[in-house]
Amino acid sequence: MPAERFTPQDLNHGFVVAIDIQAKESEAEAVAKILEDLIAPTLAEPGVKLFLPYRSPEDPARFFIFELYRSEDGWAAHQETAHFKAAIAELLPLVSSRERVPFVPFASL
């Protein structure tokens, strides 16, 4: 199946969640693997436009995830999936902090 293409306007329409994660000492590689394994099933969800995990080049134990959903309902549905629940159960004991901040567009492109 070809990748879905989005215009800047498409990317500015939806519900964004920014997630900042700090892995515990010596747990960064395990956290990276969990996040990497979460990409494909998350992108296959109908309510998801983007799921982009990043890793800090200055602090390899720090991760950032940019999530773009079609709506807030898409985010809610994501949190009910088996792959999300399994990943969170595995992830939370490995992190010292996890901050999730939702955003909505306020200006048109």
Image: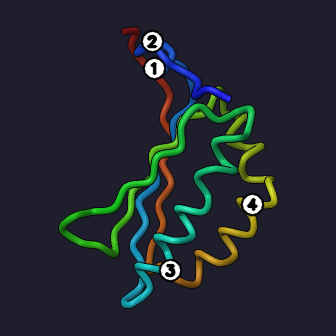
Checking the image for residue 12, the label placed there is 1
Verify CB contact (< 8 Å) between mark 1 and mark 3. no
Give the secondary structure at mark 1: loop
Amino acid type for the residue under numbered disc 4:
His
**Residue 35 locus on image (x, y percent):** 53, 63
Whole-number angstrom distance, CA of label 2 to CA of label 4? 29 Å
Image coordinates for residue 36, horizontal then vertical, percent: 53, 61
The answer to which of 82 and 14 lies nearer the viewer is 82
CA distance for labels 2 and 3 = 36 Å
- Assign the N terminus to one quadrant of the image: top right
Indicate the amino acid at tag 1: Asn
Is there a contact, CB below 8 Å, between mark 2 and mark 1? yes
Q: CA distance from mark 1 to mark 3?
A: 32 Å
Q: Which residue is mark 4?
A: 83
Give amino acid for label 2: Gln
**In the rendered structure, which amino acid carries the disc numbered 3?**
Ala
The 10 Å Cα crowd at callout 1, few under 14, some 14 to 19, many 20 or more, is: some
> Which marked residue is nearer to the observer: mark 1 or mark 4?
4
Between the C-alphas of marks 2 and 1, the distance is 5 Å
Q: Secondary structure at mark 4?
A: helix
Which of disc 3 and disc 1 is earlier in sequence? 1
Which numbered disc, 1 or 3, marks the residue closer to the eye? Answer: 3
Residue with the mark numbered 3: 30
* Secondary structure state at the residue bearing disc 2: helix
Relative to 58, residue 80 above or below: above
**Residue at screen point 58% across, 24% down:** 4
The alpha-carbon separation of the residues under discs 3 and 4 comes to 16 Å
Mark 1 and mark 4 residues within 8 Å of each other at the beta carbon? no
Disc 1 and disc 4: Cα gap in Å?
Answer: 26 Å
Q: Earlier in the sequence, mark 2 or mark 3?
A: 2
The foreground one among 109 and 39 is: 39
